[in-house]
Amino acid sequence: MAQGFGIMSFSDAASVAVVVDGHAHLDAVSDVENSLKEAYEKGVVAVVGVGMDLSSNRTILELANRFPRRVYPAVGLHPWKVNARGLDEELEFVCQHLPEAIALGEVGLDYKMKDTKALQIEAFQILLREAARLDKPAITHSRFSHARTLQLLSESNVRRAVFHWYSGPDDVLDIR
């Protein structure tokens, strides 16, 4: 079996398609073991489990330990979960556990949540700096914040990013 997302060797699978679910909120799945089994039977060899906050990050890390070579953790702080109360603890946890994760995520900006816009930017910048330092890809959410999300990614020196939720115009991503 080939390995997943950043550690996958495609040379072993010259004529076989390798399918990796690059973004799953496994903490919201009631029967993870059975769901992973079903996915594997349908050809999904690995799943990147993304975290959104302290609780889901802990769950994703536990699932990665419980299902090695099937679940790869990404730890993050989703913009919907950013608020002043507990922000330092959330950021500290992600930064502490990012070295054992395959990616940073899910992180980003969601300007529909106007009341936390400044905090979202601050948290996103802190986490992107850490991802760049560790050379981790960033799994980003960008709703109504497309240009600013891309700008912060570019300024951070993160070399690889996945836009998980991108609904902006194509010309924003034209970075030639």
Image (cartoon, helix red, strand yellow):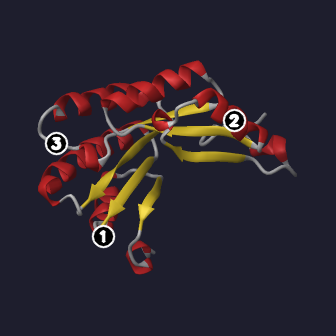
Q: Which comes sooner in the sequence, label 1 or label 2?
A: 2
The residue sitting at 46% across, 37% down in the picture is 28
Task: From the top left corner, tell me how far across and down residue 41 is, in percent.
Answer: 78, 38
The answer to whether residue 100 shows anywhere in this view is no
| Kind of residue sitting beneath label 3 | Asn
**Is 143 placed above or below 172 here?**
above
SS for dot 1: helix
The residue sitting at 71% across, 48% down in the picture is 19
Q: Which comes sooner in the sequence, label 3 or label 2?
A: 2
Q: Which one is in front in this view, the residue at disc 1 or the one at disc 3?
A: 3
| Kind of residue sitting beneath label 1 | Ala
Q: Are marks 3 and 2 in contact (CB under 8 Å)?
A: no
Instruction: Identify the residue under disc 3.
Output: 83
Instruction: Identify the residue under disc 1.
Output: 147
| Kind of residue sitting beneath label 2 | Gln
Say the numbered circle drawn on residue 3.
Answer: 2
Relative to 147, 67 lies left or right: right
How many neighbours does mark 3 have within 10 angstroms: few (below 14), some (14-19), or many (20 or more)? some
Q: Nearer the viewer, residue 122 or 134?
A: 122
Task: From the top left corner, tell me how far across and down residue 45 is, in percent.
Answer: 71, 38
The answer to whether residue 12 shows anywhere in this view is yes
SS for dot 2: loop
**Is 39 placed above or below 168 here?**
above
How many marks the image carries: the answer is 3
